[in-house]
Amino acid sequence: MIKIKKSAVLAGILGFTLALSGCGGGGGGTTNTPAAQPSDTPASTPKDDGNKDTTAEKPGLRMIMQYGLFDPKTEYVAKYIQERTGFNVEYELLPAENADEKLNLLVSSKDNYDLVKLNAAQFYNLASAGALEPIDELLESHGNYIKQSIKQESFGSATIDGKIFGIPETGAGVSIGEELVVRQDWMDELGLATPTTADELYNVLKTIKEKKKVIPLTMSKDSLYGDIATTFGILTDWKEVDGKLVHRAEQPEMKEYITFMNKLYKEGLLDTETPINTAQKSIEKFSGGNAAMYKLAWWNAGTTIAALEKNFPDAKTSIIPYLKGKDGKAMVGAKANTTWYVAILKSSKNKEAAMEFLNAKMEPETFKGIALGKEGVHYEVKDEKYYPILPIFNDELSNASSFLTGVDEEKYPIYWQARVRKDPILQAHFEAFQKNAEGIIVVDPMSTAPPIEAVSKNLLKLTTMLDDNVLQFISGAKPIDAYDQFLAQWRAEGGADMVTAANEWFQSTK
Amino acid sequence: MDHKKALEGTNTTRGVIKTSFSEKCFSVFNYTFFIVMGLTTLLPFVNLIAKSLSSEGAVISGKVGLLPIGVQFETYKYVLQDSMFLNSLKVSIFLTIVGTACSLFLTTLTAYPLSKYRLRGRKGLLLIFVFTMLFSGGLIPTYLLMQNLNLVNSFPVLFLPAMVNVYNMLIIKNYFEGLPDELEESAKLDGAGNIRILVSVIVPLSLPVMATIGLFFAVAFWNDYFAAMIYITDPAIKPMQLYLKELLVSSSGDFLKDNVDAAINATPQSIQASSILLATIPILLVYPFLQKYFVKGVLVGSVKG
């Protein structure tokens, strides 16, 4: 009796688990594979160990990287780096969200990491917390290729109290990201000439509004400055005025700019949803034929223009060259900041090996291979320009920039452009933007500044505060008369300290 | 007031007395309200399906509403060939099965003794359990504990710390308390020990609550991304929800700002949509199978004695 009961119960439990697993889609077949998954990792280590034996005395390194949507273990570039440098590196990616918290956890848990790739704020925090190793001597003894590739000024951005705490990675060099793009077919239809100043722009927008009944200019809340702001002299965060650094919040021209934009907003020339528009939303309006003008980023140009042409086969777009200011000259601001810092952790037991590894990656041939892959396989050279071979370039090198630890500052901007040549529309916009900006770029004077406490601590908060307020002034939620009141608050909440500290540094460079 | 009347009306006098005007109004309001509520949850889902089937061009120009435009299946093909997606799907399915089975097993084993009044120190033990519902060690100490146990970046960390859920344990305990003691006594007379009683008498009688709690666990494991976000950095053992979260975050404006390389590689919206959909379907399939237990289980657990 009891035996029968027992088997019935067991059958019941089994049935229940089966019901659950059966519903999981793949059924029993898939159940076994994931079981092997976690143990797959250890299973592959013997292979790595085999490699270690051949590379004899080189120790394994552990590196923390920024987030990316890939598995570093299976990436082509990771294997290539291991092949070329002989170092077996275990990569750890920070999460996409709450990366700073995770980074602090990883570093403070002293879990034997050697290298870490950081953004500017993370770099400053870890360096001032004493978690990073000063690398001056290591650079001297093991860093010949690094010193060849990276300019002295760039090292300035990684220097705190006279010591270098990381290798600065400047990325693709100074380039312009956005420019106004307009529906040329509508301009032609209305007989409008391409505007060259802010006032001409105003007239064009007004005509479009009257005749076409669409949003004349759409703008995203994430990109408030640029083409129109530059005509008032608002370029980047910092500007040199009479030998002093001035933050754009304090520039008297700021008020003129928001007054002008507020006029556009009030008259319905600027998208009334500007305060809530994301880039995605603005692109939706532009490519959907509901807006005539948009400050388009070249990296969005490929999909945006393709969608527009699909929706309206007759649609044509053109790029409006940078508008001229009151003095009749066009200008465009750009930042040349160090994007990433690669540092050696103080808790690392393999500091010398870590530096050797970083140096080996900068050996010119190795570096070219990391940036571009193999000639004839991943890229080809046409007219002295590097072109990607698709789709293998996308498959194997899309994430290559995540693996960079410093770049050859002369050559990388040239190599990097292969990434832009993946799509002809994207390439055309990138090249047109850069051509229009040639000779009129003003680089942010704070670009080469080292981490300064009062700046690092306040910049993000103050930038957000400024942008939020600028949006409120533009949309009329706050009267422009209240700008001085806002500025006083901005200064009180760290703005004044930040400007003073920035100027102290600026005077010291002269 | 209206609500009460309507209830009485439906329970006792349906069909005998004509419904009054106010009752009709209430019904109309009720139906409208719940249809609207239903639509607010259904429509985004339909929109997602439409997006996942539409061409990217139609999606980014905001033309896709409830019906797909420029139908294509390439996105699904792409996602189903994406090794990171498939891998995280496997991890999630495996985690849900193993996690649910282990949790249900342990939670039942905890609940059973605590449902017996003769257990010495029962109140104290219960208090200790309830205490953990209200207070926890905090994130960093917990992380350090996991690290010292060598669990960080390992698969078991996704379900081991969450094996006994006190809330679910209390529901099962209450259910056990509702079973007549006589059953247990008669089993004892037949010579059954504690384990035999639990396995052969109590559990078969508690299938509704088991199914309900099992579903709670399964859905919780399937939807959990926080544990993975904290403990897992190895992409090989990232579960579905974390992968999805990262896919979406890494294509959002904030993430792409000032990061040109990420901007070039951003995931198209139609692929995001099909990933979300493919990740939701497996757990949706579980519901119909457990539905009948689910309704009964919640009801039976709530009425005691």
Image: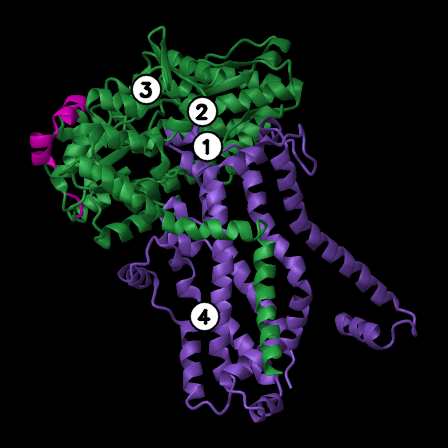
Chain colours: A green, B purple
Could you tell me how far apart the alpha carbons at marks 4 and 1 are, in whole angstroms?
40 Å
Q: Which mark is residue A299?
A: 2
Which one is nearer the viewer's eye here, B301 or A274? Answer: B301
Kind of residue sitting beneath label 3: Lys
Residue receiving disc 1: B266
Q: Position of residue A297 (x, y in %)?
A: 45, 24
* Circle on res. B77: none
Q: Secondary structure at mark 1?
A: loop
Question: In the visual, does A116 lie left or right of A481?
Answer: left
Residue lying at the far top in this picture: please name it: A383
Q: Return the residue at label 4.
A: B164
In space, the residues marked 4 and 2 are separated at their CA atoms by 48 Å
Residue behind mark 3: A374
Q: In which chain is the residue bearing label 3?
A: A
Q: Main secondary structure of the magenta part?
A: helix
First to last magenta residue range = A131-152
User: Which quarter of the rendering shows the N terminus of chain B?
Assistant: bottom right
Q: Quadrant of the C terminus of chain B?
A: bottom right
Q: Nearer the viewer, residue A298 or A496?
A: A298
The crowding category of the residue bearing disc 2, from other C-alpha atoms within 10 Å (few below 14, some 14 to 19, many at least 20), is many
Whether the magenta-drawn stretch holds residue B179 is answered as no
Label 2: state its secondary structure: helix
